[in-house]
Amino acid sequence: MARVSGVFLIAGAMAMSCALSACKRSPNSFTSGPTVLAPLGGGAHALPPAAAAPADDGNWTMPGKNYAATRFSALNQITPANVGKLALAFTFSTGTNKGFEAPPLVVNGTMYVITPFPNYLYALDLTKPGAPTKWMFKPKPAAASQGVACCDVVNRGAVYDNGRIFFNTLDGQTFAVDANSGQMVWRTQLGNIQRGETITMAPLVADGKVLVGNSGGEMGVRGWIAALDEGSGKLLWKAYNTGPDKEVLLGSRFHPFYAMDQGKDLGVKSWPPDAWKIGGATTWGWLSYDPETHLVYYGTSNPGPWNPDQRPGDNKWSSGVFARDIGTGQAVWFYQSSPHDLFDHDDVNEIILADIPWGKGRRPVLFRPGRNGFFYVIDRRNGQVLSATPYGYINSYKGVDLRTGRIIPAPDKEPKPGRVTRDICPASPGAKDWNPAAFSPVTGLVYIAHINLCQDEGHSEANYISGTPYVGADVKMYAGPGGNRGVFTAWDPIRRRPVFEIKEDLPLWSPALATGGNVVFYGTMDGWFKAIDARNGKLLWKFKAGSGIIGQPISYKGPDGRQYIAVICGVGGWAGAIVSANMDPSDPTGALGFVNAVKDLPLKTTAGGILYVFALPR
Amino acid sequence: MSSRFRVRLLLFGAGAMMPGACDREEHHSRAKPVGETVPGGESPDTIFPGTSSAPPLDARAKLYDNNANAIAMGQTLYTQMNCVGCHSHGGGGMGPPLMDDEWRYGGRIDQIATTIAEGRPNGMPAWRGKLTEHQIWDLAAYVRSLSGLPSKDAVSSRTESMSTGTPQTLTPHGDIKNSDTAQQ
């Protein structure tokens, strides 16, 4: 009879879990109109530095739009008054169906599209009706690289400079291709997939150098950033993000602001013996550059493995931001936002350069909507944190001590051996993951498309086997307070408060685009491309794409002088891998626990990869 | 008790008495050594010209398939060798899901053993030389059990570590389409 009651128990448990999930996931009930929380501040507001954000020429040559990473187009033909008439101009199928995180680029009448693996590069002729293909370049990356890419086989974008297109391939190569002919100029192998290294980031091209960093924080790689000569592809310098000072390029110029980041060889001493050699701290996110000071800024990823008990110490230089001299690679300062990271809270998010009103003048800062849920304002000359304010729901940290610079974890949310820690907010992808915010100098606001997820987490001892995952964590994510899994926040970085918020049912994995006409664009994972009013969040227009949108929208001036808006759909990435990799929703731990949070996604969208370009009717 | 439930109970009782079910805990520590060449399974599922059927199931399959001991040993290895990092607890991640009924390279236990030993071109590492043949077959038995194909009384109700998921015995499965060519 014991067996019989067992049968009943199983059936009962299944029925209950279905009932619970039904309560949580009634379709679209969590998507709301904007909630206006504060008036748009008058008076002086933040502005990007002119050297890093020059006047808009109507092109879009790098994912961040400019070195200040504003993702702001000054074009202003499209306004809240006329955006309702926005209509499709042309489309293009990219021939891929994995997560599409890259933006198209536009340079003088040609559009360039880089796809996820196998990293096709297309050139489309915008001067002809329907934008026919001018050429296509196939870099043919190694197929096996797909097996060491942690979170879908994405690519975050190409860069145009000086007649060439620069991009990275999943198998760890950097390519330079002639923008007119589509012929390869050079290629350099930087990553080694046998060690679990891939490259998914968009390079930054500045000062005659192509800057590239590795991915693989979940594979026990050792993070680095490298500078290649723009003309030849030759390696100029390479700085590791862990290990001895001489390999991290920490020399006489290195002056971190806080005591916690000061000392000799911390990249070795803040780890158990030799753990720094497999400690992650990769460079898979965004770089910014200040041409006035020749400093390049980038964040480092989580330390490995995720299981923090295997790496006592602060794990330098993981989960922090570096400022380096672009000429030599020598570091100037570093700030660690999550020492001894507990939750996979990488610090690779975008770095927006801005000058804020300060006393009678202005102060040069960085804006950082961090993965750990704090919006950081950091002095970009020395790494001093001026403020760190929660922009999402946080219960795993109590705050950031501005005296020491140190984040304060909440003890009851620290994962401990032998237990599953529940209700950790924000979850591993943070309050916001890779998808960058946009900064409008017109409104002075930062537009953040982000997520609202919490998680349960249990740990096991991870074994290091090169070329395989090095994680040691069992994660299950779910919607945070309120039940909405996505949030769109317009953040006032001076008054440190949201001006409006829009709740979205699904996690937002698409970046935002701000425009001079005060229209802001973003996409949702079920394929809606939305235009909202930059001042109050009012929904002005929307379009349903063929697949979920996680790509970076852009705006450009076409050869006909009109303003165009472009976005590429293609669900995937960590959040959408359940669809693009056809995962089984019955395992809540799938895709490092993200599957549980988006079990309904396969019914809301399908895989694809299509470019949509919009314009106002003539 | 509904009549339908009574019928199920009867079927369950009959199943428990079937000879195959008695092998579920059998250990093979004193069995004859298995052959030295791992790829017992022809794979992937494909056309074999000049014959009217796929090659027969590897003789070793019956030592491991649906065997509680092999599945439990395989479950331990699945965590220790980092299979879980890519395939999660069957739902997939960097690697494809293992708990559904789609098998890119064949779902027979000998085909799964070959996949583990030789690797596959889109990212599956080759474990030949890193694991013994016993271990590879144990792993194959566990991987096959994730799909729900073996009977539930052979799989473990416990996980290897602190897990946020459900035990394998409680994992919901849709209607499993048996892609095991040997049994079709």
Image: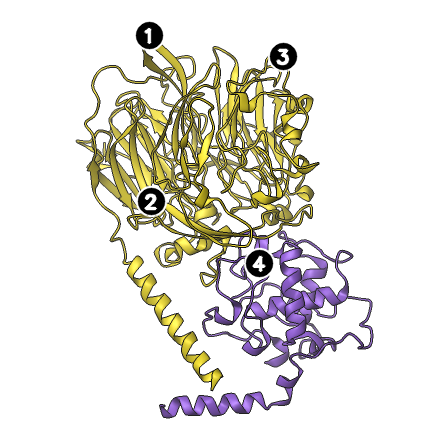
Q: Nearer the viewer, mark 4 or mark 3?
A: 4
Label 4: state its secondary structure.
loop
Tell me the tag on residue A361.
1
Q: Amino acid at mark 4?
A: Ser
Measured in 3D between alpha carbons, the distance from the residue under mark 2 to the one under mark 4, in whole angstroms, is 31 Å
Measured in 3D between alpha carbons, the distance from the residue under mark 1 to the one under mark 4, in whole angstroms, is 57 Å
Q: Quadrant of residue A392?
A: top left
Residue under label 3, please give it.
A252
Q: Quadrant of residue A228?
A: top right
Quick one: label 2 or label 1, which is nearer the N terminus? Answer: 1
Q: Amino acid at mark 1?
A: Gly
Residue A187 in sight here: no
Measured in 3D between alpha carbons, the distance from the residue under mark 3 to the one under mark 1, in whole angstroms, is 30 Å
Looking at the image, which is closer to me, A357 or A32?
A357
Q: Residues within 10 Å of mark 3 (few under 14, many from 20)?
A: few
**Residue A119 pos. (x, y %):** 54, 40
Measured in 3D between alpha carbons, the distance from the residue under mark 2 to the one under mark 1, in whole angstroms, is 37 Å
Check whether the beta carbons of the residues at disc 2 and disc 1 lie within 8 A of each other. Answer: no
**Residue B100 pos. (x, y %):** 51, 66
Residue under label 2, please give it.
A486
Q: Dividing the image into 4 quarters, which one contains the N terminus of chain B?
A: bottom left
Residue under label 4, please give it.
B161
Q: Are marks 3 and 1 on the same chain?
A: yes
Measured in 3D between alpha carbons, the distance from the residue under mark 4 to the one under mark 3, in whole angstroms, is 46 Å
